[in-house]
Amino acid sequence: MTAALCLARVSAQPPNLDSSCAKNFSSQIMGDWVGVRDQTADGVKVPIQYFRLNVRRTSDESFSSRISYFRYDDKASELRPCGEDDIVTDIGKDGTGASHITGTCEAYVNGSPKPAKHTIDEIFKMVGKNRLEGSGRGSVSVTGTPLGMGKNGKISKSTTVWLLSEDTLTIRQHTRAKFSFLCFGKSCEVESTYNAHRGTDLASLMKK
């Protein structure tokens, strides 16, 4: 399950912006980023994914972002696309940010990747210097699961923390989802950590 996110990027530091506002954080991170996502599903580590993040301002109070995910294909010896998140963030008069995320990803079920799609809504606010925190909920649908249990899943909790330190962007996300079918039910906890630096070259990540 992919991370759920408010989004933004960096270009030059805009002048005279309130450091307590989500708009300031989003303005700072405008630009292009590449990074690595480490993830666990119910405590089990899943294969590393690589990503590109692009954030742009669409109006004075709105930002649009896209995260494109890739995984390394050992047989083909190359990176293959494996998901995408589109995020629209609107800044409120109180300085908070409201983000709507729609996306596709690979959800790991019993160690195997399954196609999934999700929507998440989160509200973000500044809680410290260069630290943005958000929480919300959403829905998820996973195909190829026993009894079709992956359909109509509910994300009961999604929390995300964004940290900016010079040219390093770190995102930590926790999601809790529940799936049910007739009298059967299953919950899933996903922990994700994103570490990114400015740029567009995914190959630079493979050299590290």
Image (tube, rainbow, N blue to C red):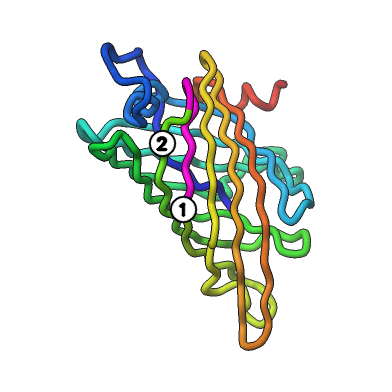
Residue located at (48% from left, 48% from top): 135
Q: Magenta stretch containing residue 163, yes or no?
A: no
Q: Which mark is residue 125?
A: 2
**What secondary structure is the stretch in magenta mostly built from?**
strand
Q: Secondary structure at mark 1?
A: strand
The quadrant in which the C terminus is found is top right
> Considering depth in this image, is 181 or 19 the residue closer to the camera?
19
Q: Classify 10 Å Cα crowding around label 1: few (below 14), some (14-19), many (20 and above).
A: many
Picture coordinates of residue 45, whole percent (x, y): 77, 47
Q: Classify 10 Å Cα crowding around label 2: few (below 14), some (14-19), many (20 and above).
A: many
Picture coordinates of residue 101, whole percent (x, y): 42, 50
Picture coordinates of residue 145, whole percent (x, y): 66, 73
> Considering depth in this image, is 29 or 134 the residue closer to the camera?
134
The stretch in magenta equals: 128-135
- Left or right of residue 71: residue 53: left
Look at the picture and state if 117 lies above or below 164: below
Q: What's the residue type where badge 1 is placed? A: Gly
Q: Which residue is mark 1?
A: 136
First of labels 1, 2 by sequence position: 2
The number of discs equals 2
> Considering depth in this image, is 162 or 7 the residue closer to the camera?
162
Q: Which mark is residue 21?
A: none
The quadrant in which the N terminus is found is bottom right
Tell me the distance, in whole angstroms, between the alpha carbons under discs 1 and 2. 12 Å
Residue located at (59% from left, 29% from top): 35
